[in-house]
Image (cartoon, rainbow, N blue to C red):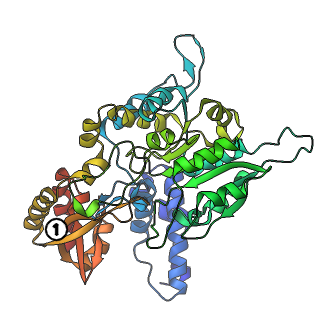
């Protein structure tokens, strides 16, 4: 075909199938199909049936871009796959609140304006032992807001600005997608004061560094890596004593959001790799604690701040709080998730992340054997991971079904997509991150990919 042989847009739209579609959508699809056909002709290729291409463009425009995926990677809190799947109760709360109006910022008792923070503050106080709580859209935002609210001009006659935040050099971590703690500090307006070395920082390093311009001590839990060997880090209690002595706040960024022990302590592979909880940090003397809602807590993406009431109020009144606040659906999902934690054993059963973390290896093996029988694959022993920058040393015994490597791309392009891991020339479908009720879907996807 030559360029001169291409039909006009109007000619293309005369096809009955395109004429039956809403004109604005059909017009855009026809123009896109013709533009791509011109590129292919100039490259020496044949563009094919233009009406079919325009109809395919229409189908693509109507297909949701954000889609459900079957996670067969064995990584439980998979950052690229949406992190924590929500519990049924959280989903029910989202549907109930999202399908109509809500009392998001309305006090039903007083008949006046209320605060969106009130809906989860009480349950967070109960679960963590904090005086007050506040929720923003993610944990990086929680740290940003906390530091921005704490660095204020001093009341001294010199009017020197207290904007220095002291952090151990070994805690200047990089979190997902290239974001680094020093960058977060800089955006908050704080000046970073590094103390100690990569592997060893002691309490005396903080004590020596505190000065008139010190606004806060910041402790960052190394969620996504561990330094082993010749190491030292001060305990929260030690930092809290320094902070109290100098009348400055201690901010503890925990990251992962543990409210109950996420792992089964009877599994020897998991021992020695634990995540601290907000309750433990506050009891040890932290003034503010920040953590995520969508990692080991197993809820929606959110950044949670708990701690001293006067400091939390500073954060609530800071101008950034409005820009970083959580929306009604996030708060609904978070409230539903937190409600399960009022009964820890119920949370272990019903919060998907906790259920997958605690599931016995034999149960996972049985699931893998059922899937292997359905798809004609082989069961292979493997190791699952927690993911999401949490518990990097934890090894979860798991079992996967090995199938042909060439099916990987077809499975990713299926409906629903299935994402596994490539290893030794085979595609592994790890069954720790697949539910029982998803096995039939995976088997059907494999059959379709082979066909």
Which residue appears at 46% of the width and 57% of the height? 61
On the rendered structure, is 377 left or right of 153? Answer: left
Q: Nearer the viewer, residue 207 or 151?
A: 207
In this view, which residue lies farthest toward the right? 157
Which residue appears at 32% of the width and 49% of the height? 262
Q: Nearer the viewer, residue 90 or 225?
A: 225
On the rendered structure, is 73 left or right of 180? Answer: left
On the rendered structure, is 10 left or right of 157? Answer: left
Mark yes or no: residue 186 visible.
Answer: no
* Quarter of the figure with residue 319: top right
In this view, which residue lies farthest toward the bottom? 44
Residue 124, compared with residue 362, is above or below; it is above
Residue 186, compared with residue 178, is above or below; it is above
Q: Label 1 belongs to which residue?
A: 447
Which residue appears at 72% of the width and 53% of the height? 210
- The total number of labels drawn is 1
Mark yes or no: residue 425 visible.
Answer: yes
Q: Position of residue 183 (x, y in %)?
A: 66, 61
Quick one: SS at disc 1?
A: helix
* Quarter of the figure with residue 9: bottom right
Q: Residues within 10 Å of mark 1 (few under 14, many from 20)?
A: some
Q: Nearer the viewer, residue 237 or 228?
A: 237
* Quadrant in which the C terminus is drawn: bottom left
Q: Position of residue 416 (x, y in %)?
A: 29, 58
Residue 103, compared with residue 275, is above or below; it is above
In this view, which residue lies farthest toward the left? 373
Q: Position of residue 414 (x, y in %)?
A: 29, 64
In this view, which residue lies farthest toward the top? 110
Q: Position of residue 252 (x, y in %)?
A: 55, 48
On the rendered structure, is 335 left or right of 404? Answer: right
């Amino acid at each position: 075909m030559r360029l001169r042989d291409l039909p006009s847009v109007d000619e293309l739209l005369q096809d009955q199938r395109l004429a039956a579609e809403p004109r604005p959508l059909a017009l855009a699809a026809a123009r896109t199909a013709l533009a791509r056909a011109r590129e292919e002709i100039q490259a020496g290729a044949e563009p094919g049936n233009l009406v079919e291409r325009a109809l395919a463009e229409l189908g693509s425009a109507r297909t949701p871009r954000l889609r459900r995926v079957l996670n067969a990677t064995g990584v439980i809190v998979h950052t690229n796959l949406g992190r924590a799947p929500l519990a049924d109760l959280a989903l029910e709360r989202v549907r109930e609140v999202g399908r109509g109006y809500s009392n998001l910022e309305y006090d039903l008792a007083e008949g006046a304006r209320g605060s969106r923070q009130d809906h989860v503050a009480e349950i967070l106080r109960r679960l963590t032992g904090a005086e007050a709580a506040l929720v923003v859209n993610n944990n990086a935002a929680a740290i940003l807001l906390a530091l921005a609210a704490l660095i204020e001009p001093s009341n001294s006659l010199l009017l020197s600005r207290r904007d220095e935040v002291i952090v151990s050099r070994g805690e200047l971590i990089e979190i997902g997608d290239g974001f680094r703690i020093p960058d977060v500090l800089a955006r908050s307006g704080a000046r970073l004061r590094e103390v100690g070395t990569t592997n060893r920082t002691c309490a005396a390093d903080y004590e020596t560094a505190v000065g008139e311009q010190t606004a806060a001590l910041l402790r960052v839990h190394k969620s996504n890596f561990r330094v082993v060997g010749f190491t030292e880090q001060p305990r929260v209690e030690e930092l809290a004593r320094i902070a109290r002595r100098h009348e400055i706040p201690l901010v503890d960024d925990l990251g992962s959001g543990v409210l109950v022990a996420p792992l089964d302590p009877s599994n020897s592979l998991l021992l020695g790799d634990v995540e601290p909880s907000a309750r433990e940090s506050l009891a040890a003397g932290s003034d503010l604690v920040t953590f995520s809602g969508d990692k080991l807590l197993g809820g929606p993406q959110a950044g949670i701040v708990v701690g001293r009431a006067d400091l939390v109020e500073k954060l609530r009144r800071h101008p950034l709080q409005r820009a970083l606040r959580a929306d009604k659906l996030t708060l609904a999902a978070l409230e539903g998730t937190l409600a399960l934690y009022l009964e820890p054993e119920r949370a272990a059963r019903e919060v998907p992340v906790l259920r997958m973390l605690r599931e016995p290896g034999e149960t996972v093996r049985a699931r893998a054997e059922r899937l292997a029988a359905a798809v004609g694959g082989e069961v292979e022993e493997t190791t699952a991971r927690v993911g999401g920058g949490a518990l990097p040393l934890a090894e979860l015994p798991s079992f996967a079904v090995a199938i042909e490597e060439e099916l990987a791309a077809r499975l990713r392009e299926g409906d629903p997509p299935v994402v596994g891991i490539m290893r030794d020339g085979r595609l592994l479908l790890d069954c720790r991150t697949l539910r029982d009720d998803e096995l039939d879907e995976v088997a059907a996807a494999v059959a379709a990919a082979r066909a």
